[in-house]
Amino acid sequence: MRKAKLFKKLEDNRVLCQACWRYCQITNGQRGACSVRENKDGQLYSLVYGWAVGPSLDPVEKKPLFHFLPGSKALSFGTLGCNFACQFCQNWFQSQGVKQEKEPLRQIKQYSKKFTPKQLASLALKKNCASIAYTYNEPAVFIDYALDTMRLAHLKGLKNIFVTNGYQSPESFRLTKDHLDAVNIDLKSFRDDFYREVCGGAKLAPVLENIKKYHQAGIWTEVTTLVISGENDSVKELTQMAKFIKKVSPDIPWHLSAFHPDYQMMDRKPTSREKLIKAYQIGQKAGLNYVYLGNIASTKNASTYCPGCGQELVKRDGYFLVRSSLKEGQCPNCGQEISGVW
């Protein structure tokens, strides 16, 4: 347990948590929506500081990041807890399980491993990683732990990656932006009612705002949408998402992932290949230069092509790099510059 950053003291021993856009007002002895930031006598504490889920080694493509140090490894870790309550969560035990606990520290210690920021940075170097990815659950809920690790990572020459639902508060953004190198942001829908009803009371606007802010801050940004049949897969909604991303920048990669039944959506069908390919075509039609499919076997739709001449530049098999013909970030055929961190 560690005293948290980003909170404001209120009357009657209440606190205002400023880690994410929920801005939970937490009474004494209670926890915020994430269940891992707790008010103790008018002070806010992080219950998960120093308790990591993972860490594990992943290809950076698995985050997914396709235009950021391709072929490199990322040391990936998260914690328990989340500020969302998505009915389709693929990591629901990690993100939601602690919310049912009256004694959360018991579950945190049972299902996490103790790692200091220094140990995480050292482990990343030992395993020849190029980066550390803060993932599996929302990094905003363990922002204190993440920040200390990020600072050490940069000192050791490592890059930092957030895999996020895009609900970081402006305060969190300001605290971390100088230590972040790349983000992948979930754009779960283009409707407020989806965020409110399916994701547990969130809103769309902060996510859109953060996509713009990360990109404008020069942090390499990619976007992921989990395509769920009957929920967020209409031509209208997919087109709205694609056009929004394109307006921010046509060079932001858009990852379209197939849904598989999980957690509270066990009655839904997996996303079909045909539905994903249609979404892929919508992204291309909207003017996005880089659209990718995930969670299905596809070499063609996981590879990078030059938006100028169409030549295959980076071939992937799922999340694994097969070969790259990029020359200093450019297409060797026509000289087109390919956006990314190479």
Image (tube, rainbow, N blue to C red):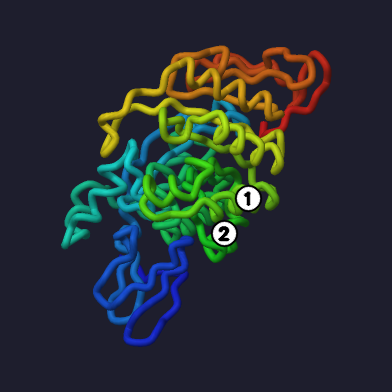
Q: Amino acid at mark 2?
A: Phe
Q: Which residue sits at x=47%, y=70%?
A: 6
Disc 1 and disc 2 in contact, CB within 8 angstroms: yes
Residue that carries the numbered disc 1 in the rendered image: 214
Q: Residues within 10 Å of mark 2 (few under 14, many from 20)?
A: some
Residue 281 vertical placement versus 264 (above, below): above
Point out residue 327 in the picture as x, y percentages from the top left corner: 75, 21
Residue picked out by circle 2: 173
Q: Amino acid at mark 1?
A: Tyr
Quarter of the image where one finds residue 249: top right
Disc nearer the start of the sequence (1/2): 2
SS at circle 2: helix
Q: Give how far across and how far down residue 312 sits, in percent.
A: 67, 13
Q: Residue furthest right?
A: 334
User: With 165 as the anchor, is 307 left or right in this view?
Assistant: right
Please tell me which residue is depicted at 54% across the width and 30% down the height of the picture: 255
Q: Is residue 269 above or below residue 124?
A: above
Q: Is residue 148 visible?
A: yes
Rendered location of residue 303, percent (x, y): 59, 18
